[in-house]
């Protein structure tokens, strides 16, 4: 009995990273639905991003200050410029385009498009797998298809603009793709890894990125948004609990789901997992070749 219990605990520890990744995705799904509802009620996406990173910086600052007080290296000008570029590519530019696209599309589309990031990151992968994943993104962006009929009325209704017909769907698709590209550039260029080597205090780095990203977003928002009332946050949005964005948005919130979104999402997911499978097989093959060379 004790042996079975130890085995169960060991398996739980092995699956802990996978469980955490699933919980993160649930959190993202919940975030997208809340954000989409706030945009429907007139909140400016750029103001939202600015407030979001200000709040993140304020919340992270105490942990970074006390937990990494002895491990935090001195911040030089060159290191600050690295953080500035990292914040621009990985925070302000990417997140602003990301949430601006949410205003023109819907949460289901955003979550599906995020699966293209591994393909964009591993640009040296097999061409067929890259094309398959990119084809899914093009299907969602360019082919809407027939409206999938819902067999019952939505349980929850968030008043606001209708997502059934959106003339700016292509604009939102382009913004989503660009946000994925900028994030992939940030990862491909190994900017994060290089900065972490010089500044290993992770909590402090996240705090700096949030603060700098908020400042960059604030400057951009002031330039494009001249209405002071846009900075006012109201408490007039009902925050509904959700389980998973694609299913909840369709079955409960009554969001319109199109055939093109379904086909494109499945194509993206298949392409992504084919890419990851190919990379794992390539690594196994390389390890086998190296072992054979060592034996010789």
Image (cartoon, rainbow, N blue to C red):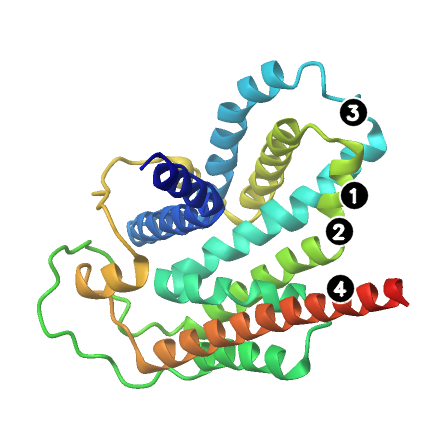
Residue 106 visible: no
- Residue most extreme to the left: 152
Spatial CA span between label 4 and label 3 = 40 Å
User: Which numbered disc, 4 or 2, marks the residue closer to the eye?
Assistant: 4
Spatial CA span between label 4 and label 2 = 24 Å
Task: Give the side of residue 163 with respect to residue 75, left or right.
Answer: left
Spatial CA span between label 3 and label 2 = 20 Å
Question: Which label number is shown at residue 271?
Answer: none
Residue at image mark 3? 75
Marked residue nearer the N-terminal end (1 or 4): 1
Q: Is residue 3 above or below residue 281?
A: above
Q: Name the foreground residue: 154 vs 236.
A: 154
Residue at image mark 2? 190
Asked whether disc 4 touches disc 2, contact meaning CB atoms under 8 Å apart, the reply is no
Task: Give the side of residue 236 with respect to residue 39, left or right.
Answer: left
Asked whether disc 1 touches disc 4, contact meaning CB atoms under 8 Å apart, the reply is no
Counting other residues with Cα less than 10 Å from the Cα at mark 4, is it few (<14), some (14-19), or many (20 or more)?
few
Marked residue nearer the N-terminal end (4 or 2): 2
Marked residue nearer the N-terminal end (3 or 2): 3
Q: Could you tell me which secondary element the residue under label 3 belongs to?
A: loop
Residue at screen point 58% across, 63% down: 117
Residue 82 lies, in percent from the top left, at: 77, 40
Question: Which label number is shown at residue 194?
Answer: 1
């Amino acid at each position: 009995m004790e042996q079975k219990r130890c085995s169960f605990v060991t398996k739980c520890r092995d699956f802990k990273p996978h469980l955490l990744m699933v919980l993160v995705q649930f959190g993202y799904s919940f975030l997208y639905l809340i954000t989409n509802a706030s945009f429907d009620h007139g909140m400016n996406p750029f103001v939202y991003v600015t407030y979001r990173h200000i709040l993140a910086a304020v919340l992270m600052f105490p942990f970074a200050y006390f937990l990494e007080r002895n491990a935090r290296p001195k911040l030089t000008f060159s290191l600050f410029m690295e953080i500035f570029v990292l914040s621009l590519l990985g925070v302000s530019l990417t997140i602003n385009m990301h949430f601006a696209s949410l205003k023109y599309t819907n949460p289901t589309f955003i979550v599906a498009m995020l699966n293209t990031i591994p393909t964009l990151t591993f640009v040296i992968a097999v061409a067929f797998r890259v094309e398959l994943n990119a084809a899914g993104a093009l299907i969602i962006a360019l082919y809407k298809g027939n409206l999938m009929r819902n067999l019952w009325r939505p349980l929850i209704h968030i008043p606001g603009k209708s997502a059934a017909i959106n003339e700016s769907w292509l604009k939102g698709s382009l913004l989503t793709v660009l946000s994925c590209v900028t994030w992939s550039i940030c990862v491909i260029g190994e900017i994060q890894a290089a900065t972490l080597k010089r500044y290993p205090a992770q909590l402090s780095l996240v705090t700096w990125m949030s603060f700098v990203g908020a400042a960059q977003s604030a400057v951009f928002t002031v330039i494009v948004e001249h209405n002071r009332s846009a900075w006012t946050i109201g408490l007039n949005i009902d925050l509904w609990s959700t389980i998973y964005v694609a299913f909840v948005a369709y079955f409960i919130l009554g969001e319109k789901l199109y055939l093109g979104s379904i086909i494109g999402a499945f194509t993206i997911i298949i392409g992504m997992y084919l890419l990851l499978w190919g990379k794992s097989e390539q690594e196994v093959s390389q390890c086998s070749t190296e072992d054979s060379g060592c034996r010789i």
